[in-house]
Amino acid sequence: MEDELFDQILTVFNNLVAWVAAGAMVFGGVVPYIPQYRDIRLTQNAEGFSTYVCLVLLVANILRILFRFGRYFETLLLWQSIIMICTMLIMLNLCTNVRMATELSTKRRSFLATDIKDEEVRIPKRLFLDFDWNYFWSWSRFVDYVQCVLTFTLVAAYITYLLLDSVLFVETLGFLAVFTEAMLGTPQLYCNYQNKSTEGMSIKMVLMWTSGDTFKTGYFLLTQAPVQFWICGLLQVFVDITILFQVYYYSRYPQKPVSHTVSHTTSAKAL
């Protein structure tokens, strides 16, 4: 009787741990962006956060979803990708609104040509693609980012449909998906290097990146996920640690004077 009760308790405990692990896997990737989102909202300054992080994650998760059509993987990872795409679009919307509210220039940079005309902005209807590569992923409206993401998704989906029977293509698609995600921290790493500072970047976000990527890589190894997943997971952890080293280095050896913007950021965080 006692053995049966113990087995039942153990089964319930195992199920609970499985549910918690599943929840952490699906929503854990979103959590690091909560403090960064909050900081941007409070300070109305998105300078320290690289929106190319959003680009990397959007491309990686779109490719991962397409990879599933050629090679099955856990449904949890599918939901993780869908939720991450929604999160990155929310981050882009906030960063675009903040940047346009503080930007002095009234010239609108767009992805697609439009017929929109008003007193401040006049854009002639010209080519279908109407953007300057110098301003790629620095557009003035959130809808331009959505148009770009939809265009990429449709093109990638069509190519995948044509080459789905090719094992080489499917495996390459899977590698590109996880390798792109492994490069997640690279835009932020470069942004910090350019600024010679990590001011405006949420350290909590990077710490959560590191812990989450470590957990995720261990999860890939334990569940025997495709080899592309865990190799690129290790690379991702390495990039996270490098960013943390930047935090230490630039705080120990400041490279530029503290600006008024930074002072405003600090006071806003204190509130």
Image: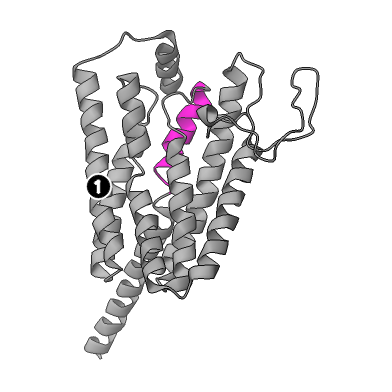
Residue 204 seen by the camera: yes
- Name the residue tied to disc 1: 237
Above/below status of 230 relative to 258? below
Which quadrant of the figure has residue 187? top left
Question: In screen coordinates, is 198 left or right of 141?
Answer: left
Residue occupying the point 45% across, 23% down: 47
Name the foreground residue: 68 vs 77.
Answer: 68
| Percent of width and height locating residue 76 | 43, 66
Residue occupying the point 51% across, 27% down: 134
Residue 20 seen by the camera: no
Q: How many marks?
A: 1
| Percent of width and height locating residue 122 | 76, 23
Quarter that holds the N terminus: bottom left
Name the foreground residue: 54 vs 222.
Answer: 54
Q: How is the image coloured?
A: one colour
Name the foreground residue: 262 vs 9.
Answer: 262
Residue occupying the point 36% across, 67% down: 171
Which quadrant of the figure has residue 223? bottom left
The amino acid sitting under disc 1 is: Val
Quarter that holds the C terminus: top left
SS majority, magenta:
helix
Residue occupying the point 59% across, 36% down: 93
Can you name the residue that lies furthest to the front here? 127
Bounds of the magenta segment:
30-43
Q: Secondary structure at mark 1?
A: helix
Q: Residues within 10 Å of mark 1 (few under 14, many from 20)?
A: many
| Percent of width and height locating residue 246 | 24, 28
Q: Is residue 41 magenta?
A: yes
Question: In screen coordinates, is 156 left or right of 263?
Answer: right
| Percent of width and height locating residue 209 | 32, 44
